[in-house]
Image (spheres, rainbow, N blue to C red):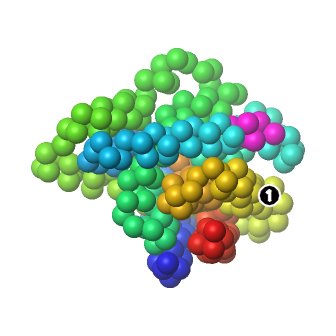
Amino acid sequence: MNLNRIFVSILTLFIVGIIGYCSRKKNILSEEAVNSLPKFLLNICSPLLIVSSMQIPFTQDKLDDIKTVFLLSIIVYFISIIISLIVPKLLRANGDNERGVYQFMTIFSNVSFIGFPVLLSIYSSEAIFYGSIFIIPFNILLYTVGIYMMASEKKKFNIKILLNPNILAVIIGFLLFAFSIQIPAFLLQPMELVGNMTTPLSMIFIGGSLCGVNMKEMFKEWRLYAISAIRLLILPLIVLLLFQNFISDPLLLGVPVVITGMPIAANCAIVAKEYGGHAELASSGTFMSTLLSMVTIPLLVLIISNI
């Protein structure tokens, strides 16, 4: 287990957010430049990341484990959605704008940038394979249920949202995976390059969005600490207690627990901005949970390692 690698991964994400904040503060990035990032991320970077991350060799030996991981994923996200209906009431959300953001925060965690490095530090590269299977429902829900939550007040939900580039990317990526179709290197490499821009650009956007937020007031907001505790500790412990008596393989048990215990997804602020949600609240929550995860993730790793 490499706790140093885990800490560096989280700290890197946090520093990139600070760079975005300082760049906007010094007007190196204009308000227009920051506000244009969500459309680029949602329509170009994120779909390419989804397709390229699903370029995994398919073998018959892994089929049973794949079914198990996928079933666990469905159960975890179902539980998360149920809990997300309660959280806004507990946190006294003001209106649909805040309600949708708190629901989104409850369901979606930062998988790729923090979750995968944590899995790699505890297990082996095989954990990344199962992690990629586990987040298939994540990608589908993020751009359907997630968008619906954010758009519930300012934009009327439209069935066309289901045909957004990210859902199409999930479909394409899964078909390529299922039929073992490999994208040629001369196409895959630029796809991966642009797709990997998703996380740093998301954090730059989050940092830039925080420029207009009163930082002192943000750290005084009890609800941000509460949603971070739900996201980082309560949900993964629920998953651990629920599955530990049924799943004997430490790897298959660890994947859903680790992914569930990651900080709020960077996509939260991106989707909120693009679909009329409370972008400042989304950015603040992502920033706060990422900061607190420097303490909670090593704790979670220790708990998993001692099972």
Q: Quadrant of the C terminus?
A: bottom right
Left or right: where does residue 190 sit relative to residue 168?
left
- Is residue 189 depicted above or below 76 in this figure? below
Question: Quick one: label 1, few (<14), some, or many (20+) residues within 10 Å?
Answer: some
Callout 1 amino acid:
Ala
| Residue 48 on image: x %, y % | 32, 44
Q: Residue at x 65, y 36 (%)?
A: 78
Magenta-highlighted residues: 81-86
The residue to which callout 1 is attached is 226
- The answer to whether residue 18 shows anywhere in this view is no
Q: Main secondary structure of the magenta part?
A: helix
Left or right: where does residue 89 sit relative to residue 224?
right
Q: Residue at x 39, y 67 (%)?
A: 124
| Residue 305 on image: x %, y % | 59, 72
User: Residue furthest toward the bottom?
Assistant: 4
Q: Residue at x 42, y 31 (%)?
A: 167
User: Residue furthest toward the top?
Assistant: 159
- The answer to whether residue 305 shows anywhere in this view is yes
Is residue 85 found inside the magenta-colored segment of the image? yes
Left or right: where does residue 10 sit relative to residue 47?
right
| Residue 189 on image: x %, y % | 20, 53
Q: Residue at x 36, y 30 (%)?
A: 171
Q: Nearer the viewer, residue 170 or 37?
A: 170
Q: Nearer the viewer, residue 83 or 219?
A: 83
Q: Quadrant of residue 98?
A: top right
